[in-house]
Image: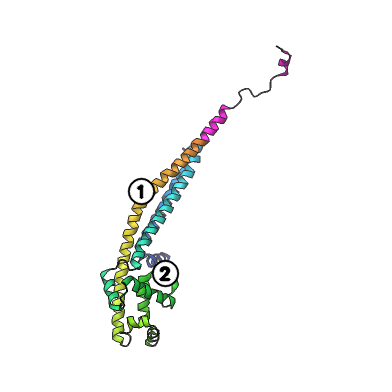
Amino acid sequence: MANPLQIILRKIWSKYAEDVGQSLIHLGALGWFLSSAAQLGMIITNKDIDKKEKQFLIPQETADGAINVVLYYTICQAIKKYADSLLERGKILTEKSFECIEKFKTTPNSASDFIKGLSEFYRQHRIIDKKKHVGNLSDFYNGSIDLLSKSPMDRNRIIKNNPMLMSVFGRVIDEKSKVKTAKGILNRALKDYNLYKNGVGVIAAVGASILACNLITPIARNITANMFQKSVQKKQKTTQAGKNNIYYYPAQVSPTFNVFKI
């Protein structure tokens, strides 16, 4: 029987092995959540803190925790997603990716247009499952490899019935050795690209976390803290004003004094 811990670790590895940057973002958000929860729990359970102070500290700490987690996650995720999109659209290419694309590209279009056109074709014709869509360059690699991995009959039928695919793969489909060579080029380029994308994702996640933790989040927390402080001060002034208007002799005057006339 498999060890439950090994099963969990295997699932975590399969999810984050090729996207370490995403794991850093998720772990960072989890760390902020646990830190805020611990701080809030300390305030609630601490008997040395006055109840009036808790009325101010508990909502403030809750708001701080929400700001920490939400801002950290959204900022890091947005920056990493933008960095990934630059790679997937072919705006930034490694040397191996550029050389691989140039081997197959037979049109005067730019590398990014070639990648986009072929990846969209793969998705529309379900060579790549739309649910497994990652991005243009990943879909180009995976779709091309899956296409060349089909049986000769299916592969030739799909390629020869489409002029765009024929211009890309027509030189290799009639010889088994050329198909194998083309698949090897694509697999090596995909492996190199995944490593590069993983590294860029880590750099983007770390940079975004520095920006979120040291600049944006502290400013948002200070603004929120000032709002809570002003709200408490306003309540205190209202309470004090009510106390100042109390009648010091609220009891009814005795009827005995009615006989006195001026």
In-front residue for pair 176/108: 108
In the rendered image, residue 42, in percent from the top left (x then y), is placed at: 45, 44
Estimate the spatial distance between the alpha carbons at disc 2 and disc 1, rounded to whole Å. Answer: 46 Å
Residues rendered magenta in the picture: 235-262
In the rendered image, residue 179, in percent from the top left (x then y), is placed at: 31, 83
Residue type of the residue flagged with mark 2: Ala
Residue receiving disc 1: 215
Figure disc tally: 2
Q: Is 93 covered by the magenta stretch?
A: no
In the rendered image, residue 36, in percent from the top left (x then y), is placed at: 43, 49
Q: Residues within 10 Å of mark 1 (few under 14, many from 20)?
A: few
Please give the label number shown on residue 2.
2
* Image quadrant containing the N terminus: bottom left
Sequence-first disc among 2 and 1 = 2
Residue type of the residue flagged with mark 1: Leu
Residue pictured at 47% horizontal, 38% vertical: 230
Q: Is 246 covered by the magenta stretch?
A: yes
Image quadrant in which you'd find residue 87: bottom left
